[in-house]
Amino acid sequence: MISVTAELFALFKALAFIKAHLQPQKVVIYTDCLAALHLIVSPKAQSARHLLYEIQTLLSQLLQENWVLCLQWIPSHVGIRGNEIVDKAARLALTSAAVETLPLQEATCSRVLTVASGKAWDSDLAAELPSSTLGAYRMDSSCHPWAHSTARALDVALTRLRIGHVGLASHLHRLRLAPDPYCQWCRGQEETIAHFLLHCPRFHSMRTELRDHLSILAVRDFTLPVLLGGVGLNNPLRYPVIHLVFLRKSRQLHRI
Ligand SMILES: [Zn+2]
């Protein structure tokens, strides 16, 4: 949106320039920003309203002074000599200390700050996550697949599975809270998160049902990164299938 605001500001400056320095005549102003032109003719534009008001006021004044104005959209300005010169001048102007500040509405400022802080946060996360258990499932701060905000107990369980702090024997044994790390149903098998979710025969029927649900969602891989983080999925699916089908039906929620 800020780029459209910048385009509108450029159109405003162009109109202000011709009004201040030229006599009424035929003028064509070219822009490659179709969105800016749509906003100028839109009666219900919600963004950059202050700029639109200034532009529409200037247009009205110029037309009353017998100017013949045309705002012309050009799909691409590559190869047009005049535009190449203007682009070069714009890049040069960025090094100037006297760059004119672009007036932004509060809502636009808020969006810009939100995006910038989100990027900074994701950059910090990207640096820190690989050294944590959660790094196997999370790459940034976007919403996790499988989240289900209306079932907090289930969401908490899923988060605990992601960070590895669960009440399964392997983890409890590491903390010296269990006499051994083994699954109570599988002799000699450590009860890890992978064993619980992927292998333990005790939960075979629930796992089969979960696979069926996932295949309906076109999810074929049955791995921890997919089950806990939706890693590799094209769309961040947010169906609570893992919670409802497996965790709840396994009746092991109290141990997670
Ligand atoms: Zn087992």
Image: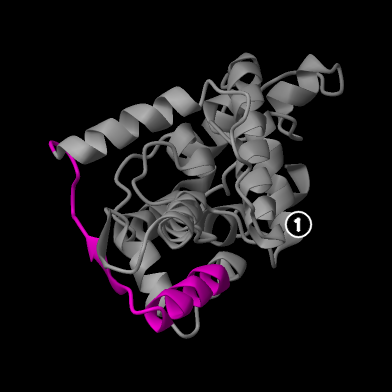
Amino acid on which the number 1 mark rests in the picture: Ala
Residue that appears at 56% across and 74% down: 53
Q: Is residue 84 left or right of residue 45?
A: left
Q: Quadrant of residue 104?
A: bottom right
Task: Residue 164 in the image: state x and y as whole percent.
Answer: 68, 28
Residue 148 sits above or below residue 161 on the image: below
In the image, is 67 to the left or to the right of 207? left
Q: Residue at x 43, y 23 (%)?
A: 92
Residue sticking out furthest to the right: 177
9 magenta-colored: no
Q: Magenta residues?
A: 52-79
Q: Position of residue 19 (x, y in %)?
A: 45, 63
Please tell me which residue is depicted at 32% across the width and 33% down the height of the picture: 87
Horizontally, residue 40 falls left or right of residue 185, namely left
**Residue 75 is covered by the magenta coloring:** yes
- Relative to 157, residue 86 above or below: above
The secondary structure type at the circle numbered 1 is: helix
Evaluate whether residue 251 shows in this view.
Answer: no
Residue extending furthest toward the left: 79
Q: Position of residue 212 (x, y in %)?
A: 34, 58
Question: Which residue has dot 1 on it?
Answer: 153
Q: Nearer the viewer, residue 69 or 135?
A: 69
Front residue (pair 141, 13): 13
Residue 226 position by quadrant: top left
Image quarter in which the C terminus is found: top right
Instruction: Check the image and report above or below for 30 versus 169.
Output: below
Give percent across and percent down for residue 110.
Answer: 69, 53
Place residue 153 in its image quadrant: bottom right
